[in-house]
Every structure is written in structure tokens, then in C-alpha cells.
Amino acid sequence: RKEVEQDPGPFNVPEGATVAFNCTYSNSASQSFFWYRQDCRKEPKLLMSVYSSGNEDGRFTAQLNRASQYISLLIRDSKLSDSATYLCVVGSGYALNFGKGTSLLVTP
Amino acid sequence: SQTIHQWPATLVQPVGSPLSLECTVEGTSNPNLYWYRQAAGRGLQLLFYSVGIGQISSEVPQNLSASRPQDRQFILSSKKLLLSDSGFYLCAWSRLLTLANTGELFFGEGSRLTVL
């Protein structure tokens, strides 16, 4: 079983739509959880951390369910500039384990 | 501000040829340094990390090696490339060895390697 699993997509949504990405992880001892964003043929960049209580950053909301080992990212009011691959990342100590990513395409 | 550079950006190499990718970090001292590989259709795989000069930890057995000759320099090498070495290689740095607090890795722009 892979450590971090994501639906690869692609998700094609119109501008203004709400879209949700899901992620599951296998290591119950994982301590830290993040979403990274990667534009086509570019390096990944940290989008946001994910906290147990859930957290929001503008149009982005991240949730964590430790019991189910499940992480989600919700994007509201999608913009064209949100088109990218979203990587679910789970950390334990020094290691960050990256999912393969979910591809999002926002269309006019 | 901190910056990270890696080169070359793109290279095409024949099977069996050597490889050297270089990465330097500016604007910080004693960073933790990492080499990741992103193969087509796969997630980022941690290859090596380093907490200091001459200190290298390998995560996966392979025909690649890493060296850290200076505090802010990290080099990825191979004596003989395999077809399976093709991929997008990313150098990264962090402030903390334990990434649990911030999770923030700062990546270089990547080196796209094609082995033919």
C-alpha cells in the first residue's frame, strides 16, 4: 500500500466552481500534513499546512481526520490560476512523503 | 532572502554515461539539503538528505550518490546512468531537519533528465 494516495484526476471544473480533493495515508504515526501546489513542469511549493482542527486560507480549506487517516482540500470560487497539480504531503520526523498529486484544470 | 539554484535545467544522456547535478543555496547557513526525484506518473521520491558537510543519508538503494563538499552545495552523481534514472530531479532545502513543524521545503527549479 502506498504511503500517500490521491485521486490523480484530472478534475475539470468551470470558473467559480467548488472542488474538493481527497487523500489517504497509511502511516498512523504521521505527525504533519500539508498541501503543496505544483505548476506544470515547475517545482512544488507549499500551499498550506493541515491542522487537526481544520484550517482555512482564503478560498482554501484543509481538513484532517486522524482516525480515518484522511486529508482533504476544498477550493471555493475556483480561478483559472488555480489550475495546477495539488500534492498531498504527510510528514514524520525528517521525511515528507508526497502523493502523486491531483490535477486540476479550471476552464473559462 | 534565500535562494536555491540547481543546474543544468535539462539534459539528455546516453545509457552508461556519468551524471552530475549541482545545487547551491544562498542566503542561509547550515541548511538541511535534499535530493528528490519525480518520475513520470509517480510522486516525489526522496533520494538523499544531508544535515551537514560530508553527512549524507540515502533513502533508496540505487546507482546514484550524493555529496556535500560545502555547507551550501549539494551534488547528485552517477557513474553509469540507467534508463530508469530518467526523471525530474529536485534539490530542496529546509531550516529544520524535523519537518513536522513547518513542512516547508524550498525547491530548486529542477533538472529534467532523459536517459536514452
Image (cartoon, grey):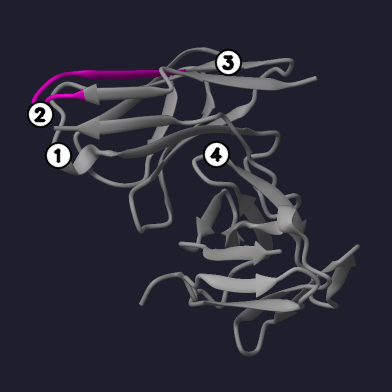
Residues tagged 4 and 1 counted as in contact (Cβ below 8 A): no
Q: Which residue is mark 3?
A: B72
- Label 2: few (<14), some (14–19) or many (≥20) C-alpha neighbours in 10 Å: some
Question: Are the residues under marks 2 and 1 on the same chain?
Answer: yes
Q: Amino acid at mark 3?
A: Arg
Q: Which residue is mark 1?
A: B83
Q: Residue at x 76, y 68 (%)?
A: A15
| Label located before the other in sequence (3 or 1) | 3
> Rounded to the nearest whole Å, what is the CA distance between mark 4 and mark 2?
25 Å
Q: Up-down: is A108 above or below A62?
A: above
Q: Chain of mark 4?
A: A
> Rounded to the nearest whole Å, what is the CA distance between mark 4 and mark 3?
22 Å
Q: Which residue is mark 2?
A: B15
Q: Residue at x 88, y 68 (%)?
A: A56
| Label located before the other in sequence (2 or 3) | 2
- Label 3: few (<14), some (14–19) or many (≥20) C-alpha neighbours in 10 Å: many
Q: Position of residue B23 (x, y in %)?
A: 49, 19
Q: Which residue is mark 4?
A: A42
Question: Are the residues under marks 4 and 2 on the same chain?
Answer: no
> Rounded to the nearest whole Å, what is the CA distance between mark 4 and mark 1?
22 Å
